[in-house]
């Protein structure tokens, strides 16, 4: 049958953040075999999938894989089956499902229950598609261990073995592969900028020394990429957001630290170039923009209720707390107010004495990041 398009395929990044927050010791995954072809089409819906091949007319009687709504329908039907069957806590991305726990036996029973529900709903599960219980497992193309995201060894080896691109298409393929792991790479946007330039339509493909150096640099960064997570919660957890506004763009990173830890754990690295008129902003505006973008990204990871400590201590913070903002700036008043409002809201959230949030100097924080990267 053809159900209404009500469910939506979840955002893959949001699923990753949620799985990070579980900090589990054991995992199990299951992949439904031929999930789309397990879903019959209603007779009245089949004509829209008709096609002709070698002068013979055909139509699909099962949900075709190439149709744009197939993932949504498939995800929704599996989700409904799991909900009606009372499935244990799990995460689902279309036909991929993962369960977790702190004991292997617990995870085994959860996985067994999920499989029973799916089989009863008419789906097929092959033994080869069931993995775990295991302390390390791949889900959504990522290696998971203790709630932390790692670049899998096979991905590392594949990227390391790649030869320099010979044309724009090969360059785009390389950028697509490494771009999936950009949150593991500090300053990613600035590092790959020379590669993006040769893919632009207005430019001829010319692979020079700058491109080769960027190519090798990115491969090294992937090989030494740090694990991200787990996302922890609680009053003892500090979420520290580092932001910087450079000549060519913005960079920010989110770290967590709890009492007794000598150094924090990274949750992600972000970067981007300036867009449109942002390049014309004053240095102060760029700092505020960097803090604004950093807070938005951090909120997706730790939620909007978690307190954030900004570092380094930005020059404009004391203006904000005193309500005395500069009268001249490049950005529009609406944009300026939007930036400041979010920073003020999150800076004060859970921090009665907000100024103490920026006590530690940027020099010390930068040294901590460098030390972590050298040890990875």
Image (tube, grey):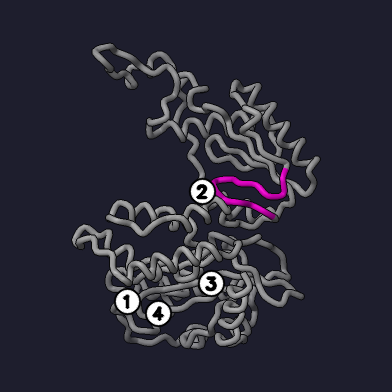
- Locate residue 300 relative to residue 235 in the image: left or right: left
Q: CA distance from mark 2 to mark 4?
A: 30 Å
The magenta span reads 134-145
Q: Between disc 2 and disc 4, whose residue precedes?
A: 2
Q: Between disc 1 and disc 4, whose residue precedes?
A: 4
- Asked if disc 4 and disc 3 are in contact, CB closer than 8 Å, the reply is no
Q: Nearer the viewer, mark 1 or mark 4?
A: 4
Q: Residue at x 55, y 34 (%)?
A: 95
Q: CA distance from mark 1 to mark 3?
A: 20 Å
Residue 246: which disc? 4
- Density class for disc 2 (Cα within 10 Å; few <14, some 14-19, many ≥20) is few
Viewer-proximal residue among 39 and 82: 39
On the image, the x and y values in percent for residue 141 come to: 54, 47
Q: Residue at x 46, y 34 (%)?
A: 71
As helix, strand or loop, the secondary structure at mark 4 comes to loop
- Asked if disc 1 and disc 3 are in contact, CB closer than 8 Å, the reply is no
Q: Between disc 2 and disc 1, whose residue precedes?
A: 2
Q: Which residue is mark 1?
A: 331
Q: Which residue is mark 3?
A: 345
Q: Nearer the viewer, mark 4 or mark 3?
A: 4
Q: Above or below — where is 289 with respect to 96?
A: below
- Asked if disc 3 and disc 2 are in contact, CB closer than 8 Å, the reply is no
Viewer-proximal residue among 353 and 149: 149
Q: Between disc 1 and disc 3, whose residue precedes?
A: 1
On the image, the x and y values in percent for residue 110 come to: 73, 37
């Amino acid at each position: 049958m053809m159900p209404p398009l009500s469910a939506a395929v979840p955002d893959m990044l949001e699923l990753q953040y949620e799985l990070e927050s579980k900090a589990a010791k054991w995992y199990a995954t299951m992949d439904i075999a031929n999930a789309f072809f397990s879903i019959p089409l209603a007779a009245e819906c089949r004509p829209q999938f008709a096609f002709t091949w070698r002068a013979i007319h055909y139509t699909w009687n099962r949900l075709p894989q190439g149709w744009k709504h197939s993932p949504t329908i498939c995800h929704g039907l599996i989700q409904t089956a799991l909900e009606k069957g009372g499935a244990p806590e799990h995460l689902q991305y279309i036909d991929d499902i993962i369960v977790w726990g702190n004991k292997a036996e617990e995870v085994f029973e959860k996985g067994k229950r999920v499989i029973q529900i799916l089989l009863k709903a008419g789906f097929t599960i092959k033994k080869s598609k069931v993995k775990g219980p295991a302390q390390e497992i791949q889900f959504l193309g990522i290696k998971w261990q203790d709630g932390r995201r790692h670049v899998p060894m096979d991905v590392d080896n594949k990227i390391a073995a790649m030869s320099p691109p010979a044309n724009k298409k090969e360059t785009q393929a390389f950028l697509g592969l490494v771009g999936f792991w950009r949150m593991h790479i500090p300053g990613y946007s600035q590092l790959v900028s020379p590669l993006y330039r040769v893919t632009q339509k207005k430019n001829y493909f010319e692979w020079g020394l700058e491109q080769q150096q960027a190519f090798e640099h990115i491969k090294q960064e992937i090989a030494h990429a740090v694990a991200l997570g787990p996302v922890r919660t609680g009053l003892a957890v500090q979420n520290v957001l580092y932001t910087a506004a450079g000549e060519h763009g913005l960079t920010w990173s989110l770290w967590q630290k709890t009492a007794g830890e000598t150094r924090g754990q990274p949750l992600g690295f972000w970067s981007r170039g300036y867009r449109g008129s942002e390049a014309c902003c004053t240095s102060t505006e760029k700092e505020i923009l960097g803090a604004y973008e950093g807070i938005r990204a951090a909120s997706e990871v730790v939620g909007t209720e978690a307190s954030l400590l900004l570092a380094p201590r930005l020059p404009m913070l004391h203006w904000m707390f005193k309500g005395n903002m500069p009268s001249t700036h490049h950005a529009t008043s609406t944009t300026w107010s939007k930036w400041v409002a979010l920073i003020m809201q999150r800076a004060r959230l859970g921090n009665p004495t907000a100024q103490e949030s920026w006590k530690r100097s940027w020099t010390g924080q930068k040294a901590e990041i460098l030390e972590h990267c050298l040890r990875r």
